[in-house]
Amino acid sequence: MSKTDFSVAILGAGPVGCALALMLARHAADPASILLVRGRPGAAGDAAPSALAQGLVPAGAADVSGGVASAGATRGAAPAAAVPAAPISVVAPIPVPASAPLAAPAVPVTPAGDAGAATTGAAGPGASAPTAARPEADARVLAMNHGSRVLLESLGAWPRGAADIQTIHVSQRGRLGRTLIRNTDFDVPQLGAVTGYPILHAALMRQVEAAGITVRTLAGARLAGQDAAGATIADVDGNILRCGVAVQSDGAGADDIRREYGQQAVLTTVRATLPRAGWAFERFTREGPLALLPHPAAPDTYAVVWCCPPERASALAALDQAAFSAALTEAFGDRLGALTCFAPRHVFPLFLSARRALVNGRNVAVGNAAQTLHPVAGQGLNLGLRDAARLALSLAPWLADPAGSPDAALAGFARARRDDRWLTAGLTDLMPRAFTTGVAAFEHAGGLALLSLDLLSPLRAPLARHLLQGLRA
């Protein structure tokens, strides 16, 4: 049996990877036995992060299914559309009632990796995948549900200045029926919150450094092999490390399951003339979901995630700011008054991609590395953090005595994450498809479902609670 350098090596230092490292360090006899690997920004050989998982985009390291909304640049900035090679995922914590009466949920996926925000990075059409940017320079925002907030607070990493979400308004354009989900329904201070990626990442890294966890910057780090004694990690510079368990929390997941939605997401930031404090909106249209999330920058500012067919996304990206603002206001309605876009716009393809198995020997996938989801309901990052919490709990007994085998613990982790993972994937897969059929009967059924959920709390509560905190086995 070859000697290991670390008990656990985590490939990906996004929010999910950092949170996992902190939780594992609490159970390890020596926190330094936990290795957190981050990529070298701009280094040749570094893989582009998945925009899906953590809600990160082309610019930063992604960690796991999450949804993100693009943060704005400076007010008055000129529009700039970009279509990167990498996909995106939105991390907004928007519990959106699924049209359950229409069909049984299919199996969707959350973004792979450790990200949890929507991409704001840019790359020209046909450009190669972007390399990782420094987290402190990332302008994306992340939306996290109540369960994720509780977890991050327990780690001492909840960032100040987040924009709270206390009410979620769900509607369908052109049809009757809407649902309101309020924090008072569940006796919690807020349903979720939106924060800046660099602020959250900095808060997590401060805790990582204080905990004594080993952090290394390696270009192109990857799983190079595994055996009964552990796994081997290698980078492009020839560094070789051995660990008992290798966790992938960065990059896109395997395409064991994949669905193309025929949609792209237009991300930007707007100001509203009639803002509503603490309100987030999910509006279903025949083109796809349209979400507006309170932005932490200012009370009248919202992050926009507009899902629509590729040709429509390209047309929206080409509009000037005034024309785009008018189109957005027309599509969204007058609930927030006039909407004015002041930030660049970015366009990303949407798809579902997931691994069937989270564990392969001593190799484990969490977050975006496990699944990439459609941004509807912003479940990517939240699902990735639940992956991390369960993995840390499962490995706790082994970390106390890493001389033994972690195989039973890893098998238990895979079983414990099955239901939550596939239910969340199924809901986020069903919603963007059910409301875009263009079939009047389905649209009316969707409106009736929203109305029923609004009027009958026993119907609304289970769905909203799942989106609020997930299934926590």
Image (spheres, helix red, strand yellow):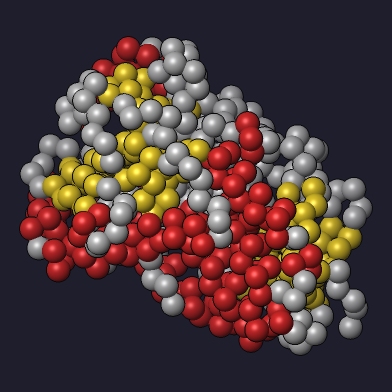
Image quarter hosting the N terminus: bottom right
Residue 381: percent from the left, percent from the top? 48, 53
Q: Position of residue 81 (x, y in %)?
A: 49, 22
Residue 56: x, y in percent?
A: 55, 42
As rendered, which of 219 and 272 lies closer to the eye? Answer: 272
Residue found at x 70% / y 60%: 211
| Residue pictured at 74% horizontal, 37% vertical | 41
Quadrant holding the C terminus: bottom left
Residue in the foreground of this view, choosing between 288 and 65: 65
Vertical placement of residue 335 versus 366, above or below: above
Q: Quadrant of residue 148?
A: bottom left
Q: Is residue 60 found left or right of 319 in the rendered image?
A: right
Q: How many marks?
A: 0
Which is nearer the eye, 278 or 80?
278
Between 440 and 340, the residue placed more toward the observer is 340
Residue at 74%, 67% in the rendered image: 31
Please determine whether, in this image, residue 436 is positioned above or below residue 337.
Answer: below
Query: Where is residue 338 drawn, in percent x and y?
Result: 23, 20
From the viewer's perspective, is residue 259 above or below residue 311?
A: below
Residue 111 in the image: above or below residue 126: below
